[in-house]
Amino acid sequence: MTDRRPDPVLIAGAGPVGLVMALELARYGVKVRIVDPMTARATTSRAVAIWPRTLELLDRAGGDLSAELIAGGNKVIAAHMLADGKSLARVPLAEIESPYPFVLMLPQSETERILLHHLEARGVRPELATALADFTPDEDGVTATLRRADGREETAHFSALIGCDGAHSPVRHRLGLAFAGETLGSDWAQGDFHLAGMPFPVDEFATCLHRDGPAVLFPLAPGRYRVIIGLGPSTAPAAPPPPDMAGFQALLDRRGPGGITLTEPLWTTSFRINERQVESYRVGRVFLAGDAAHVHSPAGGQGMNTGMQDAVNLAWKLALVLRGRATSPLLLDSYDPERRAVGAEVIATSGRLIRLGTLGNPLARQLRNIVMPFVLGLAPVRHALAGELTEIAIHYADSPLNGASWGAGPRAGMRSAPLAGEVPYGAGDTPRFTLRLGAGVAPPPDDLPGALIDPVMRANPVPGGIELVRPDGYLALAVAEGEWEPVAAYLRRLGPAEN
């Protein structure tokens, strides 16, 4: 099969989502340009949590990317929950089935530095001080005008445009897409501090519930924590400035477990929670990802991760199409329903957690504090919550890419975790599907379309089963031994059948 090499893809926004998008496309052999109007990278921490599913997906990029991120961060293995200074529950994250059974605490500035290093190793350097001034979509992509900080302009054609340009996305505005949702009527503050007297180990984070509002403490390193505190309802037009260190200390004294002393502020800010989602993640060859497509509370640390997983989802599909290895419109059509459903669920889950933590009714708070220890004491509930937090529970149950599901085994659209010692699905320079064969299952017939299949087949823990796994590690279909025609039909539906 001969690959096509079309015009480059233009990525607007060089934050973590744009960097992952560029890295994924570049390693799959797609030429990219990535632009951002910022003149220099921010050095503040901002997003600090990288969840296990994100680490699993970044592991596909090779070059020990996940290992390098882990080496610079702090592994957190449990979530501790308190109410009015008293322990309610402890949710262990180490019970999840993942090579990365923890949440990695790492400042966004460090995450971006490491991603940038790996991107530049593939010959791609973001063009800073360069804004996307305008674009005109067409059937084969977009014609875009780029404007440098000194006023110079360049117009060029690109095979696709991906807006990773934040909550105020110029790409989204230019498309005229609604960003439906609401701004919650409460103020919040967060900051990074050096502190002493934390009663929990550095590998646990704590959520402290209180009648005045919650306080959340994420350990970035020994003696260094991210502190997020609810300031209460507000009708002012904008969030007030964050409290000074004495203000943070007073709030923490009132709501926290006690004995904690803030010693030095490193960075503080205030914010209001927006819960919004774009009506469509795709218009022709223009796509939206990350905060350009969805925003929600930062308290759960899901935003950056959801955006980076948007990038992984789109990149392998776009690479197959642009390289001419797949022709079905299903691939690009699937990006919006798959990722919009995930974004909606993340918004709903984070919203439920925020509302649960900010109950105003005293009886409702009392009931919550009574019920929560019992409910979280149930192993299935703990596992479900850990799966939601760590994002390993994300799946695509209603994806248009789903094929058949067989028996009582995994269903199409579910995550397929590689077995210990296996290379991650989707690794390498070409996105390929992987066949997993149960013990005793005969190899595929010679006439099976093989252009999209990894030549290395893997063991399937389901006896007698045949599974086809997508390049992003989700199950495409599952059939019984000998049922090769559904596999062949699935592959023919996606693209060219030649080997």
Image (cartoon, rainbow, N blue to C red):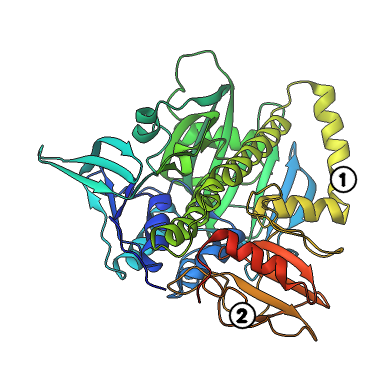
Asked where in the image residue 297 lies, by quadrant, the reply is top right
Asked where in the image residue 76 lies, by quadrant, the reply is bottom right
Q: What residue type is labelled 1?
A: Val
Residue ID at (59%, 30%): 230
User: Looking at the picture, how far across and down is residue 23, in whole percent?
Assistant: 39, 62
Residue ID at (86%, 64%): 407
Q: In this view, does 57 lie to the left or right of 150?
A: right
Tell me the quarter of the image containing the N terminus: bottom left
Q: In this view, does 247 lie to the left or right of 364?
A: left
- Residue bearing mark 1: 375
Measure the C-alpha gap from mark 2 to mark 1: 36 Å
Q: Is residue 160 left or right of residue 48?
A: left
Is residue 94 at all visible to an observer of this figure? no
* N-term-proximal mark, 2 vs 1: 1
- Residue bearing mark 2: 422
- The one nearer the camera, 255 or 41, is 41
Tell me if residue 264 comes above or below residue 103 in the rendering: above
Is residue 253 at all visible to an observer of this figure? yes
